[in-house]
């Protein structure tokens, strides 16, 4: 069932916008099938479905890297003059379309499916543990701490999603863009705080995974 949901999110990612059109900045809308990042993310998800379970974990980390690099690129783009010269404090989340979020959802679903399969096989944690730790909460799940892992994954995803809801939506940008304008400026401190919380939740989940792994490691005596 999870595999089917991953496939659905991958298709949705390609058929949905990865970037939102900002006409005054001459920034076009681009669907997933028009974006190299979209194809790379979907390729990673497809590999996670088709490869052996341990290789699939590496494919998921590749997908996560694509999403993170894309977010970093968007963060850089909004610091360029075509955005900074406009009377609106743009953030990376303003440029993000539904396609990026569909790929991110597919990543989480695929990670959950792989952790479940690894646990079903009773495979001892090896390098896959640290690869999964890169995805917030899933290292803890790999160690069998499902509730704790799910909580940290949920906290991270929730904080990031709430941060994105502070952005005007594509319809607002399009409506204002018809007259060459942008939405009225407003403080972005809440969004920055939520993004900071998301980063903090990720760091804490990594630290807790390291501690849990040390506690569950058999004594050498």
Image (spheres, rainbow, N blue to C red):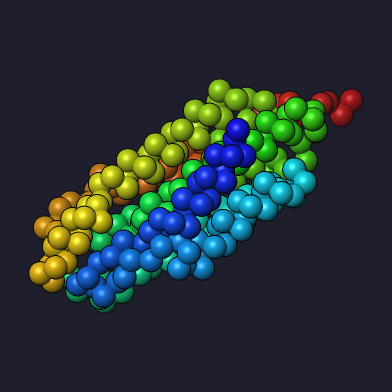
Q: In this orientation, which residue lies closer to the viewer: 59 or 65? A: 59
Give how far across and how far down residue 41 sits, in percent: 55, 57
Compared to residue 183, the image places residue 220 above or below, namely above
Give how far across and how far down residue 117 sits, in percent: 72, 33
User: Which quadrant of the structure image shows residue 165?
Assistant: top left
Q: Is residue 148 visible?
A: yes
Q: In this orientation, which residue lies closer to the viewer: 65 or 26? A: 26
Compared to residue 179, the image places residue 62 above or below, namely above
Quadrant of the drawing holding the N terminus: top right
User: Which quadrant of the structure image shows residue 218?
Assistant: top right
Query: Does residue 211 appear left or right of residue 97 in this picture?
Result: right
Q: In this orientation, which residue lies closer to the viewer: 102 or 132? A: 102
Residue at x 53%, y 29% (from the top left corner): 150
Residue at x 56%, y 23% (from the top left corner): 147
Residue at x 50%, y 35% (from the top left corner): 153
Give how far across and how far down residue 51 sits, in percent: 74, 49
Q: In this orientation, which residue lies closer to the viewer: 186 or 59? A: 59
Compared to residue 110, the image places residue 60 above or below, namely below
Residue found at the very far right of the displayed protein: 221
Q: Is residue 193 visible?
A: no
Query: Does residue 22 appear left or right of residue 159 in this picture?
Result: left
């Amino acid at each position: 069932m999870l595999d089917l949901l991953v496939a659905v999110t991958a298709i949705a990612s390609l058929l949905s916008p990865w970037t939102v059109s900002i006409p005054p900045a001459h920034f076009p809308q681009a669907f997933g099938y028009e974006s190299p990042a979209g194809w790379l993310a979907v390729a990673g998800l497809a590999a996670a479905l088709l490869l052996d379970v341990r290789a699939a974990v590496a494919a998921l980390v590749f997908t996560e890297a694509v999403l993170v690099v894309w977010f970093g690129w968007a963060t850089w783009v909004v610091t360029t003059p075509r955005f900074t010269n406009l009377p609106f404090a743009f953030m990376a989340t303003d440029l993000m379309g539904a396609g990026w979020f569909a790929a991110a959802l597919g990543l989480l679903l695929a990670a959950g499916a792989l952790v479940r399969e690894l646990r079903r096989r009773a495979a001892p944690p090896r390098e896959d543990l640290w690869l999964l730790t890169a995805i917030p909460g899933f290292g803890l799940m790999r160690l069998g701490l499902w509730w704790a892992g799910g909580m940290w994954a949920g906290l991270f995803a929730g904080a990031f999603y709430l941060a994105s809801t502070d952005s005007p939506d594509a319809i607002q940008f399009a409506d204002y863009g018809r007259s060459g304008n942008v939405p009225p400026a407003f403080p972005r401190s809440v969004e920055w705080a939520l993004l900071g919380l998301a980063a903090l939740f990720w760091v804490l989940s990594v630290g807790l995974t390291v501690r849990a792994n040390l506690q569950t490691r058999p004594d050498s005596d």
